[in-house]
């Protein structure tokens, strides 16, 4: 079996919720929480889901437009 082209393990991306006069972090939005998949040569992967469920965030995190909170790419 060939080496994977893309391997994602337990990917997490949380965005801070800021509030108050000093804009302190008061919580987090869990945009992506524990996504794992592997894409091998010749395979196609489709991310399907409702609006706002994190599909674009997964893609942007994989190509490093966003820093990941946790996990491996």
Image: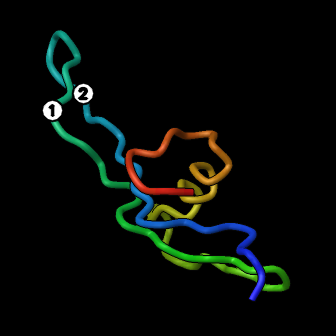
Q: Are marks 2 and 1 in contact (CB under 8 Å)?
A: yes
Question: Horizontal and vertical percent for residue 21?
Answer: 16, 11
Query: Eyeballing the image, is 24 above or below 72?
Result: above
State the image coordinates of residue 65 (x, y, percent, origin top left): 63, 39
The residue under label 2 is 18
Q: Quadrant of the C terminus?
A: bottom right
Would residue 12 be found to the left or right of residue 18 on screen? right
Q: Nearer the viewer, residue 34 or 5?
A: 5
- Above or below for 65 versus 10: above
- Indicate the position of residue 64 as horizontal and vertical percent values: 63, 43
State the image quarter where residue 25 is shown: top left
Res. 38 image quadrant: bottom right
Q: Identify the residue under disc 1.
A: 26
**Nearer the observer, 69 or 59:** 69
Give the quarter of the figure containing the N terminus: bottom right
Q: Residue at x 63, y 57 (%)?
A: 59
Q: Farthest residue to the right: give it.
A: 42
Circle nearer the N terminus (2, 1): 2
* Label 1 Cα crowd, 10 Å radius (few <14 / some 14-19 / many 20+): few
- Image point 23% across, 17% down: which residue? 23
Give the SS element for disc 1. strand
Q: Residue 15 at x, y = what percent?
A: 36, 41
């Amino acid at each position: 079996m060939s080496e994977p082209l893309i391997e994602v393990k337990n990917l997490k991306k949380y965005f801070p919720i800021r509030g108050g006069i000093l804009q302190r972090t008061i919580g987090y939005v869990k945009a992506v929480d524990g996504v794992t998949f592997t894409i091998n040569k010749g395979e196609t992967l489709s991310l399907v889901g409702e609006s706002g469920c994190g599909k674009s965030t997964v893609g942007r995190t994989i190509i490093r437009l966003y820093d990941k909170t946790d996990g491996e790419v």
